[in-house]
Amino acid sequence: MDIDLVYLWVNGNDPNWLAKHNAYTGKNNKNSTVNCKGRYADNDELKYSLRSIEMYAPWIHRIFIVTDNQTPVWLDSSNPKIKIIDHKDIMPETCLPCFNSALIEHFLYKIPGLSEHFLYANDDMFINKPVNPSIFFDKEGLPIIRLIHSRLRDFFLNFKEKFLKIPLKYYVKTIQNSAKLVEREFGVYYVGKPHHNIDAYLKSNYEHVAKMFEKEISETLNNHIRCPNDIQRILYTYAALAEKQGHEVYVSQKTSFRFHIQNRKHYAKLKKYNPILFCMNDSEYANDSDRKRVTEFLNERFPNKSQFEK
């Protein structure tokens, strides 16, 4: 089977993009969860992620980079294996401009030429060792769905919100939004958390679920930045499980490791666990020194240029 790879990418350091972003969103809450520098900062992660793909998953068929009228300066866009997809190519005009990845992700199945089997990644996600397609799809072509085991998640979240009066973070709310929609439709509530790493999908199933919840998704089309009523893409995972269109697997830190770049101890943990997949997650808690350290680490970890670079 052909297996494509889709990335979301933004260069938040681009003056033209910054002007558009600031004109639309203003500069308020610059270090908030939804509008922090870490949400859009470009530390060249995509370049190194592509190097990891060439090193460890050369069987990837085509690579699509979904972005907002931008192209990485280092990218060899003449390479036939890679293609830039602009937001306007797949999203309704009412969504634009869009600075909300949760909204963009609902339209991935509309990418022209996307294969039935595809992987989806943010630009800060990496493969750490040689893999074959069976890591992502079974012999019948159904996706391997990776989650973090979290049976008591909602119990603790409810306690935190109702008794400790600590408001839930945006990300948590959007996962709950998706879980409740799937529960309403299928009568089952999934508690496994996203592992925040490369995921596998069927395009036909993705489109099917998007149409199933078209009304609910349409109510978020004007969420140009992240909003509490966003529907997280875990919707497609939970629905696939409910319809027996995927195989649920719970991850450990040896298979999927989420690296918080402000935590220096995570460098040692990454070396210790040596996972199959890892994500170097930027956030409102990180600063420019943390980001500089990331680039230095990635350049050491993936030193050789890929065919996708000029």
Image: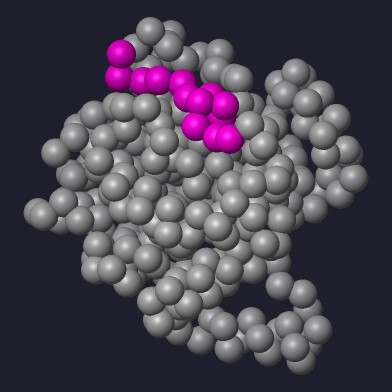
Where does the image place residue 245, in percent across and percent down from the top left?
Answer: 24, 62
Hey, which residue is sitting farthest left in the picture? Answer: 139
**Which residue is pictured at 77% across the width and 19% down the height?**
15
- In this view, the residue in front, 6 or 245, is 245
**Which residue is pictured at 65% across the width and 38% down the height?**
95
Where does the image place residue 73, in percent across and percent down from the top left?
Answer: 56, 13
Instruction: Specify the quadrant that holds the C terminus.
Output: top left
Tally of marks: 0
Where does the image place residue 197, in percent across and percent down from the top left?
Answer: 43, 52
**Which residue is pictured at 55% across the width and 42% down the height?**
104
Hey, which residue is sitting farthest front in the picture? Answer: 215
User: Which quadrant of the figure has residue 295?
Assistant: top right
**Residue segment shown in magenta:** 80-92
Q: From where the camera sits, is residue 174 visible?
A: yes
Q: Is the residue 220 above or below the residue 173 in the image? A: above
User: Which quadrant of the figure has residue 2?
Assistant: top left
**Which residue is pictured at 40% across the width and 32% down the height?**
111
Q: Is the residue 100 above or below the residue 150 in the image? A: above
Residue 51 lies in the magenta stretch: no
Q: Position of 204 compared to 151: left or right? A: left
